[in-house]
Amino acid sequence: MTASGLHSERGSGTIVALGVIASLMVVMALVVVLGAAAAAKAQAHRASDLAALAAADTARGLNVGDPCTVAEQVAARNSAVLAECVVGGEFPTEVTVTVTRTFDVPDFLKAFSLPALRASGTSRAGPPRQ
């Protein structure tokens, strides 16, 4: 091979390495966003469970107040927003609650102007269905 043939590929390893690093960074960013989404989904389900249980206790008369107001307060204490509250159904003391929770993308991804993402959770509390 001639000397000119060797010089034509000089630095190609650097370009390949930069491509691999960029690809790994994109994959890691995706993993971080998916992890944050999974955590927010779990937190939304926890908030809906707690809100539904508190609302069902109120519907049964164990607490004073309106079941949906109690559910809203419990959801707010768990960093969630009450989206829907239904008292009644198969039983008069049954409560179904849906909450939403927003979560931001990590700081290093804010340069891409991604919107705040939402996770929701729905729970039912009351007597067991037959």
Image (spheres, helix red, strand yellow):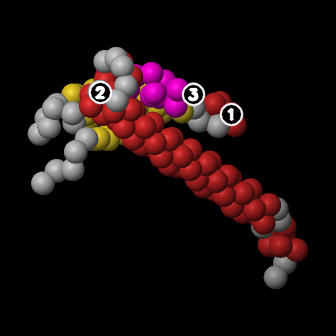
Classify mark 3: helix, strand or loop.
Answer: loop
Tags 1 and 3 in contact by the CB under 8 Å rule? no
> What residue is disc 2 on?
61
Locate residue 45 relative to residue 67 in the image: left or right. right
Q: Which residues are magenta?
A: 71-80
Q: Which residue is mark 1?
A: 107
- Which residue bears the numbered disc 3? 113
Q: Residue at x 34, y 29 (%)?
A: 62
Q: Amino acid at mark 1?
A: Asp
Residue 8 belongs to magenta span = no
Q: Real-space Cα distance between discs 3 and 2?
A: 47 Å
Q: Is residue 8 above or below residue 124?
A: below
* Left or right of residue 31, residue 120 in this image: left
Tell me the SS state at disc 1: helix
- Foreground: 34 or 23? 34
Q: Is residue 62 visible?
A: yes
* Residue lying at the far right of the rendered structure: 3
The mark found on residue 18 in the picture is none
The mark total stands at 3
Kind of residue sitting beneath label 3: Ser
Between discs 1 and 2, the one toward the N terminus: 2
Please tell me which residue is depicted at 69% across the width and 37% down the height of the picture. Answer: 108
Q: Which SS type dominates the magenta stretch?
A: helix
Q: Residue at x 21, y 33 (%)?
A: 93
Q: Determine the CA span between mark 1 and mark 3.
A: 10 Å
Nearer the viewer's eye, disc 3 or disc 2?
2
Q: Nearer the viewer, residue 21 or 103?
A: 103
Is residue 19 in sight in this rendering?
no
Which of the two marks, 1 or 2, is nearer to us in this view? Answer: 2
**Secondary structure of residue under mark 2:** loop
